[in-house]
Amino acid sequence: MKAAKFDYERPADLDGALRLLGGGGDVYAKVLAGGQSLGPMLNLRLAQPGLLVDVTRIPELTRVEDDGEALVLGACVTHAMIEDGKVPDVTGGALPSVAGAIAYRGVRNRGTIGGSVAHADPAADWPTALSALGAEAVVRGPSGSRTVPVSEFIVGVFETVMGEDEILEAIRIPKLSADARWGYYKVCRKPGEFADAIGAVLVDAEHSVHRLVIGATNAAPVTIADAAEVLGGNGVPGASFDLDAARRLVDGADTNLDDMERHIHAVALKRAVEQVAK
Amino acid sequence: MSTKGIGARLTRKEDGRYMRGRGNFVGDMAMSGLKEVAFLRSPVAHAKIEGIEIPDAIRARVFHNADMKGVRPMRPAASLPGFKQSDFPALAADKVRYVGEMIAACVADTRAEAEDLVEQIIVDFDELPVLANIVDAQKPGATLIHEEWGDNVFVVTSRDDDIDAVAKTAPVKVTRTYDMARQTMNPMEGAGCLAYWDERMGQLVLYSSTQAPHLIRTGLAEHLELEQRQVRVIAPDVGGGFGYKCIMQPEELAVAWLAIKLGHPVRWVQDRREHLVACANSRQHHYQVTAYADEKGRILATDVEVTVDVGAYSVWPFTAVLEASMAGGNLAGPYGLEVCRYKTFSVATNKPPFIPYRGVARAGVCFATELTVDAIAREIGREPHEVRFENLVTPDMMPYTNILNKHLDSGDYPECLRRAVDGIGLEAVRERQAKGEEDGRMVGVGIGMFTEQTAHGTSVFSGFGIPLIPGFEQAKCRVTPDGGLEIYIGVHSHGQGMETTMAQVANEILGIDPDLITVVHGDTGSSPYSTGSYASRAAVMAGGAISRTCKVLAERLGIIGAHLLQCGHHEVEVRDGKVVGPRGEVSIADVAKIWYLNPDQLPDDADPGGLEATGGYKPKVDTGSFTYSAHAAVVAVDVEIGAVELLDYVVVEDCGTMINPLVVEGQTFGGTAQGIGTGLYEESPYDDNGQPLASTFMDYIMPGATEVPDIRMVHMETPSPYTDHGIKGAGETAAIAPAAAIANAVNDALRGLGAEINETPMSPRRVLAALAGARKAAE
């Protein structure tokens, strides 16, 4: 399959990109970043935009900043840059660890953190991992910027809160305290495939964070923000968190999964928690 | 003798261009005026075509069945009693019978533009009930896929041994149902072809990614109603075939017709989605097996029903009968089975047609029989390999004709099994199992054995009565004026390294360095006729033909050489690239120079045939030489998520004399990887509407570097008594046993939990279902 006809623009700045997205009349414009999901969709003609707006040469979107409380990564920072430590890590190793296990190196070289979040494929890593880390999406539109927690940014399968005239500008990842612990467990048929199930957990007692995320469901990642009790309060986190406890959480969440899938998600969640309990 | 001849571990001559990306595949070709083709394929599985609406503006670039007047549908015959023929037109006529069936061909400057044309065509379908599986297709009153048939069964074959006596007295009875998933073959290069009409030669020229150029030529001529001399088929570099490219594809027929119709070159290059959805289907077998055994596990009789979901049409020329009849014929495997009753059904469904896939039918047969052997072993509480020893044909019985008329030519099957058991370290695995795993996974070990009939020829294929039966194989060999050699053969290498191995065979006879030998193959314009590279036949057949022909050349070189050496020609010997006499030697290059350039120096008795000869060959027994093998696998099963990891894998194989052990090992690695795909990953599921659910590699999982363990290989080498140099085929074998070995290992791992899995692929979902079933049964 080869893509249907489309126009292509590569604006030099964010305002230029916003003008192209907002000014098209009946032209359906789509943002192109790393193209690792959009490329195949174009070739399969599942997506047939009239205009592709390539945002990879916009300097604002590759910036890396420390604003004191959080690390701000421009949306076009690639998975490989995170994997390779080319950007600072404020998450005790969570960011590079997740980045390094996304798909294959060829995909990581081009795929971007913002593209992954904006594409909102539930089986991708960043939507779940960033929800667990309490990250925020910085969205720019014609009328300015707004900030939305990643856990609220994605509202369904391939669905976000963004309007067609908005761009995901950056991801803001809060710094974890020194004794914070995280766990991340992904089930896939083979390394490099999209996940069949993801379990993620963050325990940062100093910041009163006990957060679980059930990812790679047939819906938006499910964030359980008040998991302190199921994780055993302030004792050894997760010591009493068994498969039944995990299954109860999965069963209670809006996942659109069948029985066997919920079982596998419960296992993933349990194994993620085991990582913080060790 | 020669260090580069038969048996040498020579690196492959062709790899230089492949590794540097300098191969020449159909997709690489440039030609002035070339246009690209995209096909409109049916989105529905079963429907009448009520009308096709094509906008006027593009009508001249769109073609459908009604435009192809005079082109015959593919309607291969088979002589099996009751076989029903199917009309398979290149572009659907009044009805479509599977999703992906071609309806129209669109021609444009680029593939993308051709696909734009496809999107503008509107087809009016009158949808019919869909038969998406063998159960629905066999129900009384089911919709008919081919109305004139009366039912949906291509053919039934059977063997009717009386098993009642055994059934009454046998102390052990095991009954199982086995299912193999539908698969596609996925060579790295999909199909593709380019055609044009050559005015000067008055010839259609078709470049195609095929295993069998002569076969395609014959097929195109017959179906386009051309004379055979008016068609030339050239297979350039071919990036894998696995059987998919040994049939005439409807796309080849359509593209050939378009080239004649349009008067300019046209090309179609298959994309992966077309491959996964519409082409290269295979492997979907269903078995019901009852085996009777004594207390030691000696199998007394088997009673088997095989049903193959062969899809909507017979492919040309191998038809829909090949799978099921080969399944029936191979049920004895390497065992000395004495009583066997079977019935096979080749059932038509609304799916793409079945195509012979590496290890035709035998991956399924091996799965069914080898899992049954293990089930017997569990039933009587013996080690599975001990049960195999009770049943294997032994060397003192060779050659051995089994009850299904398979003539096993040579080998030591028990030794093969012993080496597999030792190789995998069975005792150590048993100790490890007793200790248990730190991570809670369950470890298991399993074995899969089989025999593979290779290079089976005239007497076997004539039994199927299909349109094209392999016979004698020829090679044309020419010594060049500077003492090099050109070999012309009609088989084609689609990745097997034949440019190297065939040169080694010639080197064995003439001693000409393989670097000075060119193998010319894949072109009907230059090579002797051959039905092609399939049935693991090329090394045996073309190898034998080259050997024979080179001996003719050696004789002729000897006559001239003896004259130059002033001795009798019975006193000379051709070796190491020279004619060697009692008192001196002369190089083949010098002899060739005299033949071609200085004939004034030739002796009177020089053979006027010169230094070019065509010779032919067929083994003295043409029922096939039997390669055999034992695969052993160790797995770890994560019983919480159903994941299976291969921890260790050993292959013991005997393909007779190895022309080049490196090439045999390459074939064995690749085949095993494919078999791992069959066992654990690959699956083309269909929903009840006959819609394929795996249309990209997102859903169709192939094994990759992380799924294929370091395969440890043990060679045995028992020359076939029937073939020149003792060669047996090696191309297909390794793909046959992995699913069986892995399944036996998984079932060994799950034994303590009472779970058993009897289908492929052993996906997490199937493993978890087996575990859930066992828990339920225990309640």
Image: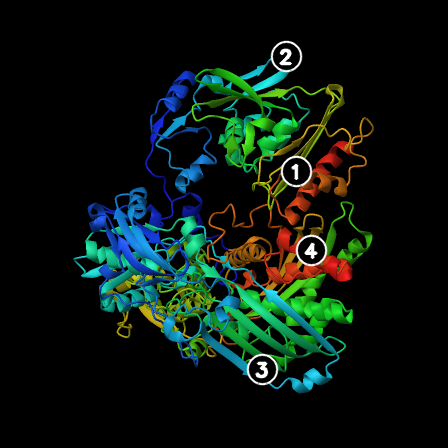
Q: Which badge, 4 or 3, is on the more N-terminal residue? A: 3
In this view of the protein, can residue A31 be seen by the observer?
yes
Q: What element carries label 4?
A: strand
Which chain hosts label 1?
Answer: A
Picture mark count: 4
As rendered, which of B492 and B149 lies closer to the eye? B149
- Per the rendering, the mark at residue B626 is none
Image point (40%, 78%), residue name = B465
Distance between the alpha carbons at the discs numbered 2 and 4: 52 Å
The kind of secondary structure element at disc 1 is loop
Which of the labelled discs sits on residue B634, or is there none?
Answer: 4
Chain letter for mark 3, please: B
Closer to the observer: label 2 or label 4?
2
Residue type for callout 2: Gly
Say what amino acid the circle numbered 1 marks.
Ala
Q: In this view, does A118 lie to the left or right of B520?
A: right
